[in-house]
Image (tube, rainbow, N blue to C red):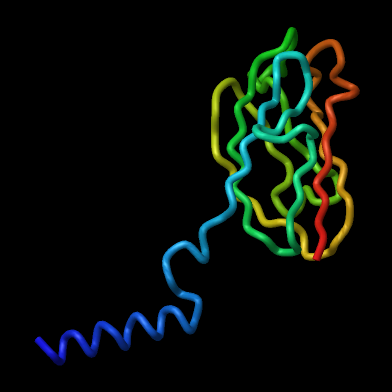
Amino acid sequence: MRMFFCSALLLLAAAVSTGASAGNSDPRVIELIAASDNTFRLLHEKSAVIRAKPGELLRLRITSQRGSEQARDGATHSLVIRALRDQGWDLRLYDGTKDYDLKAPDVPAEYLVECTVKCGRGHDDMRMKLIVVK
């Protein structure tokens, strides 16, 4: 019993010192709505701005609501950062809620997020920002 207790303490100490404890690798959850009025809204925030650290893991929990139009494939909206499309920032959104795991870019900057699905009146103004700061 004493040997087991000592081994358990050593494992716990190793996990804490290496950052391997539960939760350290979990992405930060950001809840947002791609609304039927063709706007992006972040829950619990006044403005539609995502702030992240370089390389931070993010889980975007996006609820998409159908506007007056949709794409042929049924997409109601999209969430796109044109400069980061090759890094996964090119999401087609369908009615309902879905999680998307993404990584913030390593380069600190301000990125334009936009909808590229013709979703109805106001579509051209359906934008928000991703701001990456150290």
Residue drawn at x 59%, y 20% as measured from the top left:
95
Q: Is residue 2 above or below residue 78?
A: below
Residue drawn at x 79%, y 41% as measured from the top left:
49
Closest to the observer, 128 or 78: 128
Q: Is residue 77 above or below residue 42?
A: above
Residue drawn at x 66%, y 23% as measured from the top left:
75
Closest to the observer, 42 or 125: 42
Q: Is residue 44 above or below residue 82?
A: above
Q: Splitting the image into 4 quarters, where does residue 100 fall?
A: top right
Q: Quadrant of the C terminus?
A: bottom right
Q: Position of residue 8 (x, y in %)?
A: 25, 82
Residue furthest out toward the top: 68
Residue drawn at x 73%, y 46% as measured from the top left:
89
Q: Position of residue 102 (x, y in %)?
A: 64, 51
Q: Splitting the image into 4 quarters, where does residue 133 fall?
A: bottom right
Q: Quadrant of the N terminus?
A: bottom left
Q: Where is residue 20 in the image (x, y as percent from the top left)?
A: 45, 74
**Left or right side of 28 for 9:** left
**Left or right side of 103 for 128:** right
Q: Position of residue 123 (x, y in %)?
A: 85, 19
